[in-house]
Image (tube, rainbow, N blue to C red):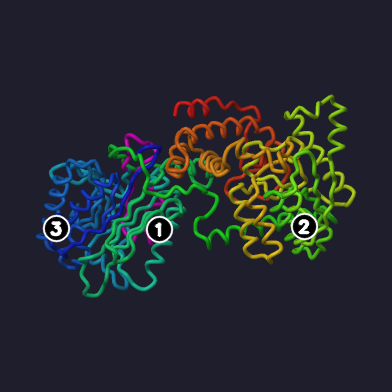
Amino acid sequence: MKYGFIKAACATPAIRVADCAYNKGRIVEAVRSASLQGVEVLCLPELCITGYTCEDLFFQPALLDAALDALAAIAADTQALPILFAVGLPLRAAGKLYNCAAVVQRGQVLGVVPKTHLPNYNEFYEGRHFAPAPEENSTVTLLGKPVPFGTKLLFACRQNASCRVAVELCEDLWAPVAPSAAHAQAGATVVLNLSASDEVIGKAQYRRALVSGQSARLLCGYLYADAGEGESSSDLVFAGHNLIAENGALLAEAQPFSGGMAVAEIDTERLCSERMKNTSFPPCKSEGYCEILFDAAGEVDKLVRAVPPTPFVPAERTERLARCEAILAMQAQGLKKRLMHAGCQTAVVGISGGLDSTLALLVVTRAFALMNKPLRDVLAVTMPCFGTTRRTRSNAERLCEALGVSLRHVDITETVKSNFRDIGQDERTYDVTFENTQARVRTLVLMNLANRTNGIVVGTGDLSELALGWATYNGDHMSMYGVNASVPKTLVRHIVATVADHSEPALANVLRDILDTPVSPELLPAQDGDISQKTEQIVGPYELHDFFLYYAVRWAFSPKKVFFLAQQAFAGRYDDETLRAWLRNFYRRFFAQQFKRSCLPDGPKVGTVTLSPRGDWRMPSDACAALWLAEVDAL
């Protein structure tokens, strides 16, 4: 359970109805197979020791006794395995028959959970055979030992405080108030559902939505193991549709009738982090619950769950296009509101021929279209100086022409030199003053033009730059509305590419050339006409910093866990030394540059990670990074 990950699985053994000895063999095979794959928690289907479709045979003592014998044999045959698993069987207790899940590890039955909600409609007749779970826990004698019996059982891992497992059965999930809701409020982060859900048209899709939705509402990992091959086909067909979800995301699935095992890691630390921040999730209420300790099977060193290298950018093309379009719409609507509220005639944008200013200008033109305002009132300004190259200036001009906005050139070279003389700066000294003077003069030009034209300055800086502090304080750091403030650099690129793919040739061609241009503030003199100052060579690759930002801020993961995930996501692309170096740089800059984020202008929130001091991120400007840097150094 390294870094809170628990490797979990759902499996459907091929059984024979009422043949407990045969079923025992198939169940043991499934447990062994899962254990060989490093699975730590396994969920098996409802009543799989006997078969779900035994009907009135459930009243036969021969079947019930055979089920107990099979459970004893299953426990004995898996005694050497560290895996925790839940298996379904009918069980007599206090003069009644219950549909139960037995939770087993290392040859011991740790607890038994009876089903609460018994379907007795349409094709289901469970009320004919079983009693609903008692309200309170008790003890039953099972295999010669007292065993906790009831719905309020929590199986807690000794090695990982964030891993607490609870159980419900099939119909419990379909009920208006599922037992898993109480389990989650009692601290369960992983819920096992032993199910026997027959297959009808449309049910698989509904089942996916139900499992995913429950995991989202409860901020939990949810394992759903479905009955399959071998169940009676007299009136029903069972498909073995196994599902694993985490906080609304479907992590793994064994497709109906595939006979497969669903395997995934559940990140219990991530779930606990989300619950801690979510004020709608109540404090732990575990009254009446019995906690049963178990030992972790081992540590997960390599994940089977996907760790996308670009967490802000969907991998699937249709979803990616939809996200890009949605973000553009949100940015434009936010800017429209600000322009209308301020009674602006113009919107002023500094255009460099780079990605961020390009996206900002695209947003401005959309906002003006929403307001039915003429694009001539969009004032794009190029401000060439020492580092401006012909390529970026040309692209800025072509972009404005293709969009039909007004373009103004303001060469700031003499103004910058004048300021150098005022403060005694040697213009041959390429230091931070040399760079930042240019950035602040550009902001001065934009602000004054906005005043002259009854407009506002639209900021261009993106989320990644704000995280790293890659902005000049009171230079490009400042605007009257920052439309890109919550859009990370990796996503900026895809949004611009999406617009290019759906534009006329003149606009598409210039957008693609801008996409191919190295990211640069162009504050140092060009070399042979080419960009000399390449941002990613100085601060590091933006794909890495966006990855670090997502996991460090959105999920509050420790540096060592962020590093572990980066190893999985960027295997074969970056070695450990490179990852460590840029991770250290990320934390160093993130802490040192908070003062720039503490006074950001307004800007629309478009995703789950933003750094607005008025919203999602509030941090002292002088917080110390020593703890985080020490952890990185210890990797």
Query: Against 595, is 459 above or below?
Result: below
Under mark 1, the amino acid is Val
Instruction: Name which of mark 2 and mark 3 comes first in the sequence.
Output: 3
503 relative to 449 in the view: left or right: left
Q: Are marks 2 and 1 in contact (CB under 8 Å)?
A: no
Q: Residue 64 carries which label?
A: 3
The label shown at residue 400 is 2
Residue 572's spot in the image, x, y percent? 43, 43
Residue identifier under label 1: 211
For marks 3 and 1, give the one nearer the viewer: 1
**Snapshot quadrant of residue 106:** top left
Q: Distance between the residues labelled 2 and 3?
A: 79 Å
* CB within 8 Å, label 3 to label 1: no
Instruction: Give the residue furthest to the left.
Output: 62
Q: Which residue is drawn at 13% across and 59% down?
A: 22
Q: Quadrant of the C terminus?
A: top left
The picture places residue 568, in percent across and down from the top left corner, at 42, 43
| Residue at (31% x, 51% y) in the render | 9
Q: Is there any visible trace of residue 598 in the rendered image?
A: yes
Q: Which of marks 2 and 1 is nearer the N terminus?
A: 1
Q: Does the magenta stretch include residue 171?
A: yes
Between tags 2 and 3, which lies in front?
2
| Residue type of the residue flagged with mark 2 | Cys
Local packing at callout 2 (Cα closer than 10 Å; few below 14, some 14-19, many 20+) is many
Total numbered badges shown on the rendered structure: 3
Magenta span of residues = 155-183
